Amino acid sequence: MKLLEGRTGLIVGIANDRSYAWYIAQALLEAGARCAFTHLPGEKNERRTRRALEELGLKDPWLVPMDASKDEDLDAAFGRYAESFEKMNFLVHSIAFADREWLAPGKFVETPRGAYLSAVDVSAYTLVGMCRRARPMLARGAASGGAAVMAMSYYGGEKVVPGYNVMGVAKAALECSARYLAWELGAEGIRVNVISGGYLRTLASSAVGGVSEMEEAVPKRAPLRRNVEGADVGRTAVYLASDLSSGVSGETIYVDCGVNTVGL
């Protein structure tokens, strides 16, 4: 029997086959989980997500549109999930947004109010909004195999990474939100954790100024002398979704080849 056999959940954030969410889906599926998915509204976004899922061998995935910045979209997507599945054993939040105009060294102090608020809304508040809607299904999951919520962060939410700017602020809010959610939902057996993945060249990371220097610097500084791979994060997600992490909640787990432990 596979580690996650009999468990079902929702993955939010697969944009293409290079995203962390894609590697998480790959690992969860290989461990026997049944996965449902959302995509950003629009035919182009749906096609892109479907192509990524086809790479995972899924020809007819459960896939619905959702703009997480809109309450009505959250209501509709989680409502449709509840109609299709009786429980939710895991929820993967792997979305973030910040206007790339303000993601460059020296631009943080110029960040306008609207750009600041939209980054925190999409990157952090949406975790709270999703958990509120998923709570009854997660509680049923906790009673039948376990329930785990996981969100994706980055070290720029704890230390200054020049150019990460307002996204770092949003990730700090995300990590703190996860801790408060872990406290409130823990009474129902629902665990909430954050994976702080290292630098990976993705659609999102390409928007941050100075990423090429980051890609070159990490293998020189990290204890493992390499950049993180998507599969590293995928395997950590399997751990968090399984009984192997039954006593772990409210944590930010670094999967970055150890670079966060190095001071210089």
Image: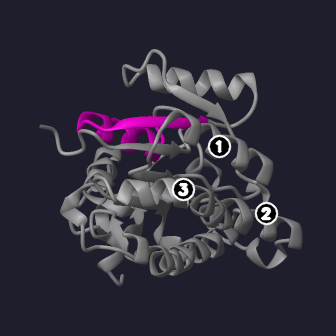
Residue type at tag 3: Val
Residue at disc 3, secondary structure: helix
Q: Is residue 138 above or below residue 44?
A: below
Q: Which residue range is magenta in the image?
A: 18-38
Q: Is residue 126 above or below residue 251?
A: above
Residue type at tag 2: Ser
Q: Quadrant of the N terminus?
A: top left
Say which quarter of the image contains residue 261.
Answer: bottom left
161 vs 39, left or right, is: left
Which one is in front, 140 or 131? 140
Alpha carbon separation for disc pair 3 and 1: 38 Å
Which of marks 1 and 3 precedes in the sequence?
1
Which one is in front, 264 or 29? 29
Q: Which residue is mark 2?
A: 118
Mark number, residue 79: 1
Callouts 2 and 3 close, C-beta under 8 Å: no
Q: Position of residue 90 (x, y in %)?
A: 41, 52
Can residue 67 be seen? no
Image point (71%, 42%), residue name: 76
Q: Which residue is mark 3?
A: 211
